[in-house]
Amino acid sequence: MNGEKSDSTTPATLLWAVRLLLLQALGLAALTAYLLIRLLTAAEVQVGVAVALIVMAALAAAAVVVVARALSRRAPGARGPAVVVQLFVIASGGFLLQTGPAWLGLLLMAFGLVVGVLLVSPSSTRALGVD
């Protein structure tokens, strides 16, 4: 074993939180690809702003993967950053709720709430040794 704890003792809440965090990272990677395509195909673009946004989206995707991996290894310090990611997801959903499309905003808010609840559930808390 390489320091990782067995999946047989990892609670389902923590496993699902990790899986959903990886799904969020995949979404950020898709956003990064979309922004890159927009940069390359747009008629008029402010290159500096576009590149900065692409880099930030890529870094966010990488950071979420790092947090998900740390949670999968049951590092207690990973729960805080994972919860902060969910707060950003909920805030992004709130922004979309106001500016549109509202359905996507509601979906993001619900998704962030579900992952947040999984992260702070008693079984996940015990598995991470945070109690």
Image (cartoon, rainbow, N blue to C red):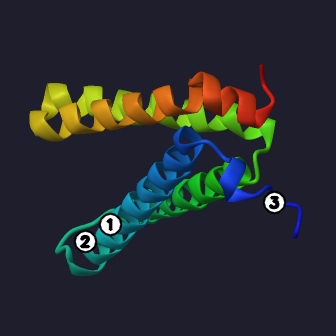
Looking at the image, can residue 49 be seen?
no
Residue 85 horizontal/vertical position (percent): 53, 37
Relative height, residue 55 to residue 92 (above, below): below
Of pointers 1 and 3, the one earlier in the residue sequence: 3
Task: Say which of 48 and 120 sits in front.
Answer: 120
- Numbered disc 3: secondary structure: loop
Graded by Cα atoms within 10 Å as few (under 14), some (14 to 19) or many (20 or more), the crowding at tag 3 reads few
Amino acid at the residue labelled 1: Leu
Taking depth in this image into account, of 100 and 72 the one nearest to the observer is: 72
Q: Is residue 112 left or right of residue 61?
A: left
| Residue designated by label 3 | 4
Dot 1: element: helix
Do labels 1 and 3 touch, CB within 8 Å?
A: no
CA–CA distance in space, label 1 to label 3: 36 Å
Residues at marks 2 and 1, CA–CA distance in whole angstroms: 5 Å
Number of the label disc, if any, that sits on residue 35: 1
Whole-angstrom CA distance, mark 2 to mark 3, is 40 Å
Question: Which is more N-terminal, label 3 or label 2?
Answer: 3
* Residue occupying image coordinates x 29% and y 69%: 34
Callout 2 amino acid: Arg
Relative vertical location of residue 123 with respect to residue 34 in this rendering, above or below: above
Residue at 27% in and 26% down: 94
Q: Which residue is mark 2?
A: 38
Q: Are marks 2 and 1 in contact (CB under 8 Å)?
A: yes
The N terminus, quarter of image = bottom right
